[in-house]
Image: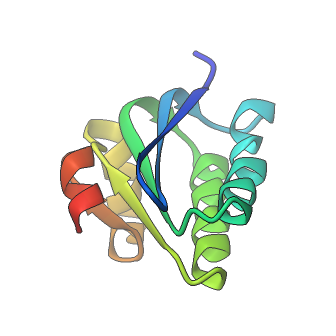
Amino acid sequence: MLLEIQQHEVKPGVMVVKLTGSVMRGPESQQLEVLVPALLAQGYRTIVFDLSEVKRIDSTGIGRFIFSLNAVDQAGGQMRMAGATGYVRDCFRVTRLDTVFQFSPTIEQACAE
């Protein structure tokens, strides 16, 4: 399944990026490396990735999130992950990246923190 990316502003400066499908090697997930800097350039300082509809992720996909986190950190912002479950959540746990990324069970909680 390809990756679909939707975004919506929940409040000034806070953007939710909803991902659906697979975050894996390929041009679809490479879009994240363009999207995040563009959002930062538009003034968004909190980016919440909604992973509730992501079914698969590989090391390249995780690398795209690491790239995004570095870009957000350099801009003085915050990046949060919401709704990750099952295999996707386990991939972050196994790589110990669950200690690097900020995870919340829901978008609402991620946006409120």
Residue at figure coordinates x 71%, y 48% from the top left: 35
Left/right placement of residue 69 relative to residue 31 reads left
Give the quadrant of residue 70: bottom right
Query: Looking at the figure, which quarter contains the N terminus?
Result: top right
Left/right placement of residue 54 relative to residue 25 reads left
In the rendered image, the vertical position of residue 25 relative to residue 92, given as above or below: above
Q: What's the image's color scheme?
A: rainbow
Residue extending farthest to the top is: 1
Horizontal and vertical percent position of residue 7: 53, 36
Residue extending farthest to the front is: 12
In this view of the protein, which residue sits in the foreground, 12 or 70? 12
In the rendered image, the vertical position of residue 29 relative to residue 43, given as above or below: above
Residue at figure coordinates x 57%, y 62% from the top left: 44
Horizontal and vertical percent position of residue 88: 38, 42
Residue at figure coordinates x 77%, y 34% from the top left: 26
Horizontal and vertical percent position of residue 37: 73, 61
Q: How many badges with numbers are in the image?
A: 0
Residue at figure coordinates x 37%, y 55% from the top left: 81
Query: Looking at the figure, which quarter contains the C terminus?
Result: bottom left
Left/right placement of residue 89 relative to residue 29 reads left
Horizontal and vertical percent position of residue 67: 67, 66
Give the quadrant of residue 111: bottom left
